[in-house]
Amino acid sequence: MIWVVKQFVIHQTLEVEQERVRFPIRVELEYQQEPEISSGSVHKKVLYNKSFLLERYPQLKERDLDDLVEEKIQETIRDHLANLDEGKKKGAK
């Protein structure tokens, strides 16, 4: 059984009032790779400066920000796992 830990930084763009804000999101993804990745073995840790964004933009709702960040993270995880599957298929040929 092999456990893989991937760390990466993604960016999310947020348009608030007349301002466009691009902020980093640090993601740590941990999953069991052998024999294949199961959804139950995927764990993630997320870090971004949520308190600053909510203080700086009081009209921004915490739940909306959480949803936006989660959507971006899930998209990134799907892309990462899809790339792993493609790599396995190419390696099997």
Image: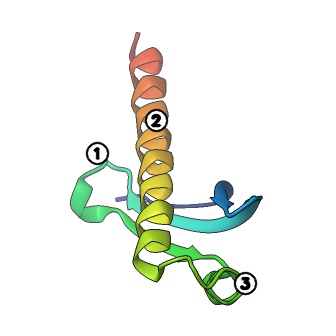
Quarter where residue 52 is shown: bottom right
Spot occupied by residue 42 in the image (x, y as percentages of width and height): 34, 62
Report if the CB atoms under discs 1 and 2 are less than 8 Å apart. no
Task: Give residue 84's mark.
Answer: 2
The residue at which mark 1 appears reads as 35
- Which callout, 2 or 3, points at the residue further toward the start of the chain? 3
Spot occupied by residue 43 in the image (x, y as percentages of width and height): 38, 69
The residue at which mark 3 appears reads as 56
Position of the N terminus, as image quadrant, is bottom left
For the point 25% across and 55% down, the residue is 39
Q: At numbered mark 3, what does the secondary structure look like: helix, strand or loop?
A: helix
For the point 33% across and 49% down, the residue is 34
Q: Amino acid at mark 3?
A: Arg
Q: Which of labels 1 and 3 is toward the front?
A: 3
Q: Amino acid at mark 2?
A: Leu
Left or right of 39? Residue 80 is: right
- Which callout, 1 or 3, points at the residue further toward the start of the chain? 1
Q: CA distance from mark 2 to mark 3?
A: 38 Å
- Which callout, 1 or 2, points at the residue further toward the start of the chain? 1
Task: Give residue 9's mark.
Answer: none
Position of the C terminus, as image quadrant, is top left
Spot occupied by residue 10 in the image (x, y as percentages of width and height): 66, 55
